[in-house]
Amino acid sequence: MINKTYKPNPFLFQDRGYKGTWAYNKDNKYYKYNQNDYYGTYNNLTKTEQNLTNAFLSTADNKNLSFYKQKTFNSVEELFVFLHPGVRKTLKELINNSNICQKYRDNLKQLILLFYNFVANVLDKKSTDSILSGIIINKNLSSFGQTTRNNRTIQIAPASLECIYEETIINEWKKGGKSTNNFFHTLIHELGHIIHYYYEFNNIDLVFHLKEFLKSKISNFDNLDIDIEKTFKSFAFSSYSLTSKYEFIAEGFSYWFLASNDLKTKGWELWQEYFKNYLIQIKNQHLKKNKIKYTILDIN
């Protein structure tokens, strides 16, 4: 990867700089962006580290990659007919919540359809209901969203559904805080947590395998002046993702799932391959090795 010359994504360069990655955001603090010093001298980067960060931030080669090879359902209406009545009720309550911005309703339906098709094809169809059944609106929530690890419930604050929330997320993104400027960031971010927890409960470490995946993608990695921890942190697209392994995966998932074409970088393509292909292989190897007959999502 890093033996080539890469031009950083112009949209990220203009509106955000490189805030968010380890290379340009030391100790998770925001720095004033200096357009003439975009190699990030705060961490005294080596040339290899500069090239690696530029590689991750360069424009995607293929922005038209699909989330899945085939659709399980072609429309929200078709999906809702299939869903368990309790799950259908939960989702309709979310879509018809009095706090939700009117212009978001149709987009929310399409995101639910995209997410269901992704999980059904990449992980397991039977257990997708259990993921979507745990979404609730909590007016007492202090943050925009929260995922409960043990019972895997997603709580969304009413403020996350309001029209003004889009402006809030855009401002956060420009400061380097969150990975995307899409107004549904909170919901997809929390769904990313749920997926992470399902893997973890089956003893599959997503962060370990992400590091192994990145090493496999960098030519001559063992002979370069960079270690896997720096590689891993350079792959972050928000400072928030550097706060814990759970936030790293959730932020990566939301960036991959929601990124507009302007935001799609080479790093986005790697997240695409990691979630769609690499983890499937890891999951299947794990099930076969341990002679497990239940699927990755069949948790008691």
Image (cartoon, grey):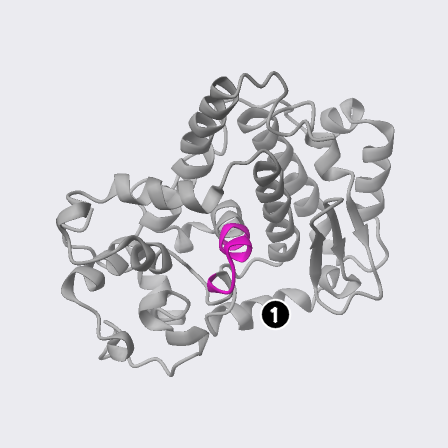
Number of callouts: 1
On the image, the x and y values in percent for residue 20 come to 42, 67
Residue beneath the point at 55% across and 51% down:
250
Q: Taking 70 as reference, is 235 left or right?
A: left
123, 137: nearer the viewer: 123
On the image, the x and y values in percent for residue 264 come to 39, 50
Residue beneath the point at 21% across and 70% down:
45
Name the residue at the front extreme.
Answer: 290
On the image, the x and y values in percent for residue 139 come to 84, 64
* Residue marked by disc 1: 167
Please say if 156 is above or below 92: below
Q: Indicate the amino acid at tag 1.
A: Glu
Please say if 107 is above or below 48: above
Q: Residues within 10 Å of mark 1 (few under 14, many from 20)?
A: few
Which of the 4 quarters of the picture holds residue 297?
A: top right
Magenta residues (range):
242-251
168 inside magenta stretch: no
Q: Taking 230 as reference, is 108 left or right?
A: right
Residue beneath the point at 75% across and 66% down:
159
**Magenta stretch: dominant secondary structure:** helix
Which of the 4 quarters of the picture holds residue 100?
A: bottom right
287, 162: nearer the viewer: 287
Where disc 1 sits, the SS reads: helix
263, 150: nearer the viewer: 150
Residue beneath the point at 17% across and 46% down:
222
Q: Taking 99 as reference, is 227 left or right?
A: left
244 inside magenta stretch: yes
Which of the 4 quarters of the picture holds residue 27?
A: bottom left
On the image, the x and y values in percent for residue 60 come to 32, 47
Q: Quadrant where the C terminus lies? A: top right
